[in-house]
Image: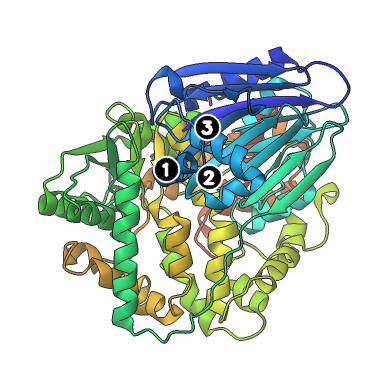
Amino acid sequence: MCGLAGELRFDGERADLAAVGRMMCAVARRGPDHAGSFSDGALALGHQRLSILDLSIHGHQPMVDREAGLALVFNGTIYNHPELREELRYRGHRFSSSGDTEVILRAWAEWGAECVKHFRGMFAFAMWDMQAKRLWLARDRFGIKPLYYSKNAERLRFASSSQALLSAGGVDTSLDALALHHQFTLHAVVPAPRTVLNGIRKLPPAHVLRIDADGTETLHRYWELTAQRPSDDLSERDWVEALRGKLLETTARHQAISDVPVGVLLSGGLDSSLLVGLLAEHGTLPRTFSIGFEDQPEEKGSEFEYSDLVVERFGTQHTQIVIPNGEVLKRLPDAVDAMAEPMVGQDAVAFYLLSEQVSRHVKVVQSGQGADEVFGGYFWYPQMDAAQGTDLERFAPYYFDREDAEYQGMLTPPYRGRDVTSELIGQRLAGIRGDTFIDRVLALDVTTLIVDDPVKRVDNMTMAWGLEARVPFLDHELVELAMQIPPALKLAEGGKGILKSVARGLVPDGVIDRPKGYFPVPALKFVRGEFLEFMRDILSSQACRERGVYERAYVDTLLAAPDQHFTRLQGSKLWHLALLEYWLQRHVDGLCSPKV
């Protein structure tokens, strides 16, 4: 797990090493253990390492094989690297390290760009072919690891964060009107390749991008998720056993592939609790970590009563972290600085503060992210399933944050336009090979929507503290199996029915049968007091008025009754506006020095 950066020139000039150095500084917190660089005329690579596998100097990057003419920078973990190493040895390759980075290098030498199909894990990497003078960028199937780039006629720059590209300079920071429509309709999800800034794009998940010496691009998709029943007619018991076996194998692999201890972020929900239970089945007791906040009159600020049940059942070495509510707003600017893109999920600050504390104890944790999307855990899935109409007509009323008409009245004329979000979601749903509507929705969720909301949020907030977060529920072999399971088994018992069946007898019933919970952050959930004044100041600021994105009448309407304007998924519409503006002030206007 690391941070990477680089530049490729198309104009005959040598790569700007100073610009690459600035990008490396911007991603330094992602990899505090070692910094390395490589240059080859028009190409320069930079890398910040977080040492997880092969802690010796043999694991340092950039990793260069001059005999094969390859240079690599890589961020992520390849969980099947031991098996691949043995296969490549059989094919005649020699290794000087025990980590996964060299396996990627040798796999590329053996299979070329097709090597990504062999990898089981999370990854973003750049491979430079010294002979062909050709650069390749690759990203894992679910976009667990980020990869941003900025391109003009003279050069391409790429990095693990948008902050790094901005720090290098020369980025078009004008707002992408189409991306804004996604931002405000899909609760801050802007599907690749767009971002809210015209000058920054991101590599789509499950894709490889080839960039030739003259700047010509060739984009290739190497994997596609389907959601169809197998030819064999399996019983519910068969599905439960198949899923249990794959979960046991996946969680054990995520725990074992590390040369440093691996903990678990234990929220008290079913997903993280099941991770602990599955690891205990293997005879492993990971360190566990939970976070909570002060209670508010309307809501408890923690779920310790549930995480304590798991700790008591398995006897894990547990750390319980309590954050005063007064700290939440104080640390919110730091959390926004860690965002590669504007994120409205209020639990981002919770993950940021949790990661700060956890990173003092371990370098790697497993997290339950992805289980709700893979196994149908959210309340809106049954609502959609019961609706009538086309896929889009069933999906939009229960998921889109606002109608297009409201959106058009929210922004000033330069940022208005057609309903591009409906177009995009309609096209993507239609393009998925799924037996039923819910099959297609879940496949859309895990390949598109989750990428730029919870997955990105967890990566950004953990890596801000040099903490690697692993997400076993997004192991592609596990997801491929889950997508074959009949939707009725997933939506049963109020959602995640089949996952609850796997957990029964392993995890305390009190955790399995509890109501669905969300990361409680009371100080940011209730739009009042200091939090309301914070947003009022942002939206009334000179910077916001001069930017001219929002219609002032719409802003004034929200400010007049902030507790009456919520999205279909119960997000604060006021916060959506304030967060984007605040992110732009922090990252684009130069009102802060980004810290990630």
The answer to which quarter of the image holds residue 176 is: top right
- Mark 3 neighbour class, 10 Å CA radius: few under 14, some 14 to 19, many 20 or more: many
The residue type indicated by label 2 comes to Lys
Question: Is there any visible trace of residue 112 in the rendered image?
Answer: yes
Q: Nearer the viewer, residue 458 or 263?
A: 263
| Colour mode of the rendering | rainbow
Count of numbered labels shown in the rendering: 3
| Residue occupying the point 56% across, 81% down | 435
Q: Is residue 442 above or below residue 537?
A: below
Q: Please state if 570 lies on the left or on the right of 217 as rendered.
A: left
- Mark 2 neighbour class, 10 Å CA radius: few under 14, some 14 to 19, many 20 or more: many
Question: Is there any visible trace of residue 560 in the rendered image?
Answer: no
N-terminal label among 3 and 1: 1
| Residue occupying the point 45% across, 60% down | 477
Q: Nearer the viewer, residue 531 or 427?
A: 427
From the image, tell me which residue sits under label 3: 338
Which is more foreground, mark 2 or mark 3?
A: 2
The residue type indicated by label 1 comes to Glu
Locate residue 105, reporting x and y percent: 56, 34
Q: Is residue 298 above or below residue 462?
A: below
From the image, tell me which residue sits under label 2: 456
| Residue occupying the point 58% across, 48% down | 116
The residue type indicated by label 3 comes to Ala
Q: Is residue 342 above or below residue 164?
A: below
Q: Please state if 289 lies on the left or on the right of 63 as rendered.
A: left
From the image, tell me which residue sits under label 1: 86
- Residue at the far top: name it: 18
Which is more foreground, mark 3 or mark 1?
A: 1
Helix or strand or loop: what does disc 3 sit on? Answer: loop
3D distance between C-alphas at marks 2 and 3? 11 Å
Locate residue 196, reporting x and y percent: 71, 43
